[in-house]
Image (tube, rainbow, N blue to C red):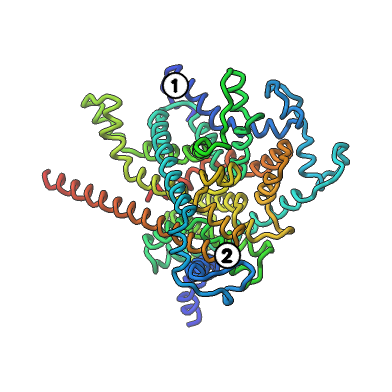
């Protein structure tokens, strides 16, 4: 890697690169900057780059987690703090469940081959086609009247697991196919049962695939709005739902809302920087390998 | 004997949880929706109490000017957005497919917009489009131009929504086409270079045709997703002004929650689903036809040898 030779490029090319980078992350940086401003600074006509950064907006949003009294908060609105906890629980639990269930199914489909790979990829595509808006009415009806799990976290988790499963099965399949069957046979010789083979031999080998699948499911569960909005009640609202609720108010408090938006954006941003390779693998696996 | 039984059951044991979850929370709701689309149903009723009205919802929708408008807006939005993104994404990939330092950093930065919640994307664009404090109008004003009514005028609102979507999703196409470009056989490139092909000739006659299968799949994936866009538009304009940006997903959710017409919303969902199925099958058929043609050409070429 170190002695790789790079081509020399024209300066205009670098200018273009810089312009692209500014365009790609400019809006995100602007959101961060706004979340660190006082409303006076947001509304003032002066230059938007010169201001005193403050964490007041974050203090307002997270007021029930503060271990100190913030002087500027007269009334602590706990909605956001509660939503953050809900979002975390829902996203984490549904990611773990999806991975465990999806992994087992993918393994069965690859190793015991009673359905072609084509069938699976076709049904994955078919499931991907279904917009969340289409699930809105039936999920609302069934969850409310038949399962009676509307307004609970479990209800939201169940939809997310089901929504993410096809993609996870599909992506994990492409990793499991690459595990040499000889390894599994060797383990079986040594006396491991089917579950032993799966957990001790296969799982450790497909870690990159698991990472990609985990990031994608977490992202969907963390970011989803529509179904959470239909299913959640006051106590199980997630962060996207609270954000939308607060922008429909007449007077938007831009500083605080940008701070909540930033908090919602932070986990995906961290994942992107830590695991961009896995994300790109996950994104391209479907299209490029076919 | 017992182990044999366990072994025979293993695949089913491994598959069962996934099958159950998907049947209960995905297939059953879709079936339910198809049934619900034949009912006159409002959210306070149980589904059994709703009146069966046959195809009434579907017929009503066809006669509903607002529904036709939002159907048209959806198609317009998907077509405009996907075309722009394909051109920009593939163009950038062709341009940036070079051996440069920091390519991985660049790719990382480019996927950020896709990873962030659509709600947040809507939020930051809404702030930037803000009539007085947003950066666009501020810049325009300081340069001495008239401010633009980004979100309050019908056609500007549509353009604003398109711009936000292009910002968010062009990187997707860029990344996929870049991956396709980098997996092209080097021998073809070298052969064409030796034959004296210029950069443009290489792109048009070699790179693009070889990338075609990936591009078609990318286009399909992006097109499907373009019909699912909802949150960004909800936050930016909530469908307004008028119906200028009210795409079908948004109309479905409003019909269900504001107008409380679950049956009609279900019928609308079915229309959307049918549209998507037609598109997907068309793309699949095209893909298969292309594959068959290349296979035939390859076979013919081999026979010539």
User: In the shown orientation, is residue B145 left or right of residue B180?
Assistant: right
Q: Name the chain under label 2.
A: A
* Residue with the mark numbered 1: A13
Q: Is residue A210 visible?
A: no
Q: Which mark is residue B277?
A: none
Q: Is residue B183 above or below residue B137?
A: below
Q: Residues within 10 Å of mark 2 (few under 14, many from 20)?
A: many
What is the x, y in percent for residue B121? Answer: 59, 40
Which residue is located at x 68 percent, y 30 percent? Answer: A33
Q: Name the chain under label 1.
A: A
Distance, label 2 to label 1, CA atoms, is 50 Å
Q: How many marks?
A: 2
Q: Are marks 2 and 1 on the same chain?
A: yes
Judge by depth and name the residue closer to the eye, B119 or A280: B119
Asked which secondary structure carries label 1, the reply is helix
What is the x, y in percent for residue B45? Answer: 62, 72
* Residue with the mark numbered 2: A139
Judge by depth and name the residue closer to the eye, B55 or A237: B55
What is the x, y in percent for residue B76? Answer: 43, 44
Which residue is located at x 53 percent, y 57 percent? Answer: B252
Which residue is located at x 72 percent, y 52 percent? Answer: A83
What is the x, y in percent for residue B36? Answer: 51, 69
| First in sequence: mark 2 vs mark 1 | 1
- In the image as oriented, which residue stretches furthest toward the left? B304
Front position among marks 2 and 1: 2
């Amino acid at each position: 890697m170190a002695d790789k030779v790079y081509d020399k490029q024209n300066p205009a090319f670098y200018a273009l690169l810089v312009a692209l980078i500014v365009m790609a992350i400019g809006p995100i940086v602007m959101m961060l900057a706004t979340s660190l401003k006082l409303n006076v600074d947001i509304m003032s006509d002066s230059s938007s780059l010169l201001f005193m950064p403050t964490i007041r907006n974050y203090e307002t949003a997270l007021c029930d987690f503060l271990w100190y009294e913030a002087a500027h908060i007269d009334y602590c609105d706990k909605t956001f703090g509660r939503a953050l906890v809900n979002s975390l629980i829902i996203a984490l639990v549904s990611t773990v469940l999806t991975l465990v269930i999806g992994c087992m199914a993918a393994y069965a489909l690859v190793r015991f081959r009673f359905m072609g790979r084509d069938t699976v990829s076709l049904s994955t595509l078919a499931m991907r086609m279904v917009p969340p808006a289409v699930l809105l009415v039936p999920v609302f009806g069934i969850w409310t009247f038949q399962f009676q799990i509307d307004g609970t976290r479990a209800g939201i988790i169940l939809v997310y697991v089901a929504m993410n499963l096809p993609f996870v099965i599909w992506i994990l399949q492409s990793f499991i196919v690459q595990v040499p069957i000889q390894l599994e046979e060797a383990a079986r010789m040594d006396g491991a049962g089917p579950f032993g083979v799966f957990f001790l031999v296969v799982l450790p080998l497909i870690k990159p695939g698991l990472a990609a699948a985990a990031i994608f499911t977490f992202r969907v569960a963390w970011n989803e709005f529509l179904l959470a909005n239909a299913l959640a009640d006051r106590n199980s609202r997630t962060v996207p739902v609270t954000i939308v609720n607060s922008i429909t108010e007449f007077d938007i408090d831009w500083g605080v809302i940008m701070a909540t938006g930033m908090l919602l954006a932070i986990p995906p941003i961290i994942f992107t920087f830590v695991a961009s390779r896995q994300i790109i693998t996950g994104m391209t696996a479907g299209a490029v390998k076919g | 004997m017992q182990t044999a039984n366990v072994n025979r059951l293993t695949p089913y044991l491994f598959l069962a949880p996934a099958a159950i979850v998907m049947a209960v929370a995905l297939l059953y709701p879709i079936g339910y929706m198809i049934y619900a689309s034949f009912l006159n149903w409002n959210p306070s009723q149980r589904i059994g109490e709703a009146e069966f009205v046959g195809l009434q919802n579907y017929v009503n929708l066809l006669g509903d000017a607002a529904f036709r408008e939002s159907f048209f807006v959806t198609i317009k939005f998907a077509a405009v957005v996907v075309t722009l993104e394909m051109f920009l994404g593939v163009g950038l990939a062709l341009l940036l497919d070079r051996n440069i330092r920091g390519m991985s950093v660049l790719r990382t930065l480019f996927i950020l917009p896709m990873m962030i919640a659509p709600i947040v994307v809507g939020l930051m664009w809404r702030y930037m489009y803000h009539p007085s404090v947003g950066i666009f109008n501020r810049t325009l004003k300081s340069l001495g131009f008239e401010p633009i009514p980004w979100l309050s005028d019908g056609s500007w609102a549509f353009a604003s929504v398109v711009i936000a979507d292009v910002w968010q999703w062009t990187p997707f196409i860029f990344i996929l086409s870049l991956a396709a470009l980098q997996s092209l056989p080097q021998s073809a490139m070298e052969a064409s270079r030796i034959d004296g092909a210029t950069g443009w000739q290489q792109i048009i006659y070699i790179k693009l045709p070889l990338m075609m299968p990936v591009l078609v799949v990318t286009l399909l994936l992006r097109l499907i997703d373009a019909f699912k866009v909802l949150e960004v538009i909800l936050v930016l304009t909530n469908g307004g002004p008028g119906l200028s940006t009210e795409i079908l997903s948004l109309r479905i959710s409003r019909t269900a929650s504001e107008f409380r017409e679950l049956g009609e919303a279900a019928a609308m969902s079915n229309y959307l689903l049918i549209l998507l199925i037609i598109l997907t099958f068309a793309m699949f058929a095209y893909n298969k036809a292309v594959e068959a043609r290349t296979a035939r050409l390859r076979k013919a070429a081999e026979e010539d040898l």
